[in-house]
Amino acid sequence: GLLIMGGLSTSCIQEDFSECHNTYCLELSYLGDNNTEIFPEKIGRVHMYVFDKHNQCVASRLLPEADVEAQITTLPPLSSGNYRIVCIGNTYNTEVSNLNSGNFKQMTFADCDYVSGETVTGNDSLYWSSVDCSIAPYDEYKQPDTLTTYFASSHYDIYVEVVGIENLHRTSKIQAIELVGVSPLTNFNNIAGSQNATYSMEFAEANNGNLIATNNIMRHRVQDAAYLRVVGDGGVSLIEVNFAQHIAKHGIDITKHECMIPFRIEFEPSNTINASIKVTVPTWFVELVKPEF
């Protein structure tokens, strides 16, 4: 069973130190892409998991809000030895599986809807960190040690705008905006896998009539066959855009922690039944990537 972390053991008495533990603190940091602390802006909830040298989970807890705000927490009372601490940020709608497998490649986190077999609209904006930690034998005069764990991003932001819907055949309507072949799982080494999910994005109509859809996906290898699909009446595919080709064409830097992959799908006026379709990125994104000097 997991030890749920509480206060330090009260059975530590002067003559017998077997129940005594050194105090260790864990600082939480996320530097993003510019080496400035942006943890408070990006991460609002942290789940912490402590593993022993056999990769067995010996403690787990959702950190108190006050600890997350202060960016520091206390480790549970641990016997001397080597441990690994894994933290996952923003697990609002995220579920962890195979925690007792003893193998970090098999322990995964995924959207709750994926785990329960329902339609997935996207992921939380997830972050992950891991730090190794050596706990020394108890010393009553030892000052508390502080470790820092640095978070990395586990997601890409996706932004889709669909323009010129009035140029679609008048009986046609957009039924769905899908991300096909995306990876729904990330393991405890922060590597996404299992390239087999379709996310159905929630979209809304902006006041200019354009459709806007945003969500997050896991940071999977985009050279795999993932694509954006806009679906019309009767499940007809109006357009499919390969992720890898789109990223290469528009110079999107997917190595960044804070990375957005934007799509602008424009149905252009046409005298045939099928509108011609232009795929680009929004103009504001181009200005963001290539600032004018």
Image (cartoon, rainbow, N blue to C red):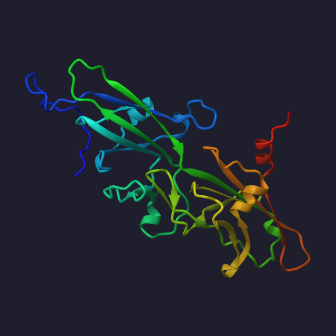
Q: Quadrant of residue 93?
A: bottom left
Seen from this angle, which residue lies furthest bottom?
A: 234
Q: Is residue 284 above or below residue 263?
A: above
Locate residue 167, reporting x and y percent.
84, 70
Identified at 29% across, 49% down, the residue is 54
Q: Is residue 171 left or right of residue 45?
A: right
Seen from this angle, which residue lies furthest right?
A: 271
Q: Is residue 215 above or below residue 224?
A: above
Q: Which of the image's four quarters has the C terminus?
A: top right
Locate residue 66, reporting x and y percent.
39, 32
Q: Quadrant of residue 106?
A: bottom left
Q: Is residue 205 left or right of residue 103?
A: right
Q: Is residue 203 left or right of residue 61?
A: right
Q: Quadrant of residue 164?
A: bottom right
Seen from this angle, which residue lies furthest left?
A: 15
Identified at 55% across, 36% down, the residue is 41
Identified at 32% across, 34% down, the residue is 134
Identified at 80% across, 42% down, the residue is 290
Locate residue 150, reporting x and y percent.
49, 36
